[in-house]
Amino acid sequence: MMTTKLSHTGPLSYGRLLLVLGCLYILTGITVFSSQVDLGAFNIWVILLIASIKASLVLLFFMHLKYEPPLLKRTFIATIFILAIFISFMFWDVAFRQAL
Amino acid sequence: MQMKDKFGIKLGMWLFLYTEIMLFGALFLLYAAYYKKYTANFAESAQELNLVFGTVNTVILITSSFTVAASITAIHNKARKLAIALLATSSTLGIIFLINKYFEWSHKIHAGIYLNSDILTNGPFGSNIFFSLYYLITGLHGLHVFIGIMLLIVCGIMVAQKRIVPGNYVFLENVGLYWHLVDLIWIFVFPLFYLVI
């Protein structure tokens, strides 16, 4: 068969979009609250973790990535992987500079 | 009738978005490197930023992301008027975001915090870096918001003119992707500039 399913489903229903929006509101509340609590060095990790969860929700549902074909998902993962290489190599560099 | 390669059009948009991720990714990289070196200065400077403005703008952008996504659902469900209303809401929210940004920036500039100002150049080096990154990243992000608003307005007009119709709305989807990316970047800008302690 030549017909390939391009997009697995159409747009999400209003209900599901609203559910995602609700989750994003709650996570925003949590992140603002967490910034008022002093967790020392953990604060930055907590707010980054929550930001990553929020970003994932936007990507998967608002940007429809969850329902796209594997090719699109792979290109996205490759991009994030390259960005992760940049970030890790930079910290690697910074860490060794202190030893000098 | 010309057949449209919808997947190809979408993939092309995503490839463009990857370059945007790299653009802002590099700026966040810069932030990370300086944060490690000047953690205390960064935390002090972040206290200067107004948490209320930041939180309100976060809620505004998240909501506008929802209304854009819902406008695609609306056009798919043949609810043309609802789609136009949702797009109008999205662009209005974008404009409110920029107005807030304008007040926020002017407040900072009046307080003597701007690039190359006396307070920053004579103050701690880390704070100077923090505010340079603040103006650079929020400025570049603001430019993206402005472009996004224009594109949303164009989409609204195209829906009204029936150039975006239930069977053919890939342009709206791509504009939606752009707007979501703008939201995505703000999701990281907000904690890094307003919430670090």
Image (cartoon, coloured by chain):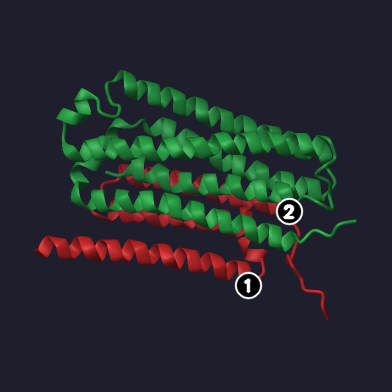
Q: Nearer the viewer, mark 2 or mark 1?
A: 1
Q: Is residue B161 above or below residue A83?
A: above
Disc 1 residue type (three-letter): Pro
Crowding near the residue tagged with mark 2, few <14, some 14–19, many ≥20 C-alpha atoms within 10 Å: some
Task: Return the chain for callout 1.
Answer: A
Pointers 2 and 1 within a single chain: yes
Read off the residue under disc 1. Answer: A70
Question: Would you say B11 lies left or right of A29 here?
Answer: right
- The outermost residue toward the bottom is A1
Task: Answer whether residue B142 is visible to the viewer in this image.
Answer: yes
Residue B136: x %, y % from top left:
37, 38
Task: Answer whether residue B44 is visible to the viewer in this image.
Answer: no
Count of numbered badges drawn on the protein: 2
Q: Is residue A79 above or below residue B94?
A: below
Residue occupying image coordinates x 51% and y 25%: B99
Task: Return the chain for callout 2.
Answer: A
- Dot 1 falls on a residue whose secondary structure is helix
Residue A52: x %, y % from top left:
45, 56
Residue occupying image coordinates x 24% and y 42%: B42
Disc 2 residue type (three-letter): Ser
Chain A colour?
A: red
Read off the residue under disc 2. Answer: A13
**The chain coloured green in the image:** B
Crowding near the residue tagged with mark 1, few <14, some 14–19, many ≥20 C-alpha atoms within 10 Å: few
**Is tag 2's residue or tag 1's residue first in the polypeptide sequence?**
2
Question: Would you say B33 lies left or right of B181 here?
Answer: left
For the residues labelled 2 and 1, the Cα–Cα distance comes to: 22 Å
Question: Would you say A99 lies left or right of B89 here?
Answer: left
- The outermost residue toward the top is B110
Closer to the camera, B89 or B95?
B95
